[in-house]
Image (spheres, rainbow, N blue to C red):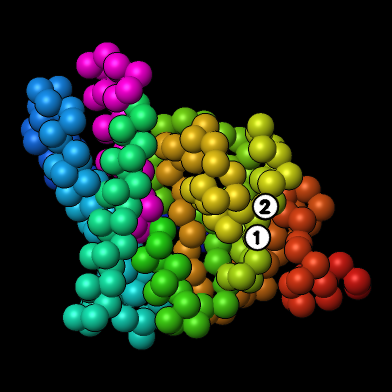
Amino acid sequence: MANSELLPLGRALDRVLPKVRRDILQKLLPALLAQPEAARSLLVQVMAGAYATGAQTGWVVHGSLLGGAPTTLTGAAAREWRDRAYEHGEFIANRFGRLLELEPTVNQLSRHAAVAGESSVWAGQDDAAQEVAILAEAEWKVWVRAWPRKEHRDWHDALEGITIPEEDMFTLPGGPNQGAQVYGPRDWDAVPDPGEHLNCGHALKYQRHATAEDLEGTRRGVGTIYTPPTRSAVWAREENQ
């Protein structure tokens, strides 16, 4: 189903992730291995840069897809995103501080740094995509695949192509967090479980309008894949018919 994929985002990430990986392997890891305590500022900088890269990517991709939505940032907006990026970098650095207290092996440190970098790109992308959707007044969101799967999760795949109102929540139909309601992939606030979010390769595609074909697959999933929140006027009507 074409509505189950977001190929432009995947292609854009293919272009930016190699640089993030190089920054981690060539700049950050040597510093962490040599003097972990002194490397904190560099850690913040690299992770903030990864987040900013993801945000810029998400802003351009989703702005282009929505049509008429902003694809460039004003000076004030750019400064706001820069601040968000450094807040994210500080957050990651604090988590690394706890990891370093456990005296990780070189392999463990390398693994955590790589995961943190890729996750930071996705975090920036997710935040920017939602911001663009709000500015564009997109009323719908679709759970889609944007990146090849690294870890197979049947319950995430089952949500592909499901279209719901932007403000509503998806219900996870399986897995260890079955029944949890999430805004989209990587909703850490709702489900703070790395096993749920890392390497899933899904994203949200936002739409101003939804076609009957978009909603047909969603209706077939009512009661199994997606349990509509009661606050949704659209789905309250569906349930009461």
Residue at 29% x, 16% y: name it. Answer: 103
Q: Position of residue 191 (x, y in %)?
A: 59, 44
Question: Which residues, given as a range, are shown in magenta?
Answer: 100-125
Disc number for residue 181? 2
Q: Residue furthest bottom?
A: 68
Q: Is 162 located above or below residue 71 in the figure?
A: above
Residue 113 location, x and y as percent?
26, 32
Residue at 45% of width from left, 68% of height from top?
130
Which is the main secondary structure of the residues drawn in magenta?
helix
- In the displayed structure, 139 sits above or below 96; it is below
Query: Residue drawn at (49%, 59%), measured in percent from left and top?
Result: 204
Circle number at residue 236? none
Residue 209 horizontal/vertical position (percent): 56, 79
Q: Residues within 10 Å of mark 1 (few under 14, many from 20)?
A: some
Query: Residue 101 magenta-drawn?
Result: yes
For residue 121: magenta? yes
| Number of marks in picture | 2
Question: Residue 61 falls in which quadrant of the image?
Answer: bottom left
Estimate the spatial distance between the alpha carbons at disc 1 and disc 2, rounded to whole Å: 6 Å
Q: Residues within 10 Å of mark 2 (few under 14, many from 20)?
A: many
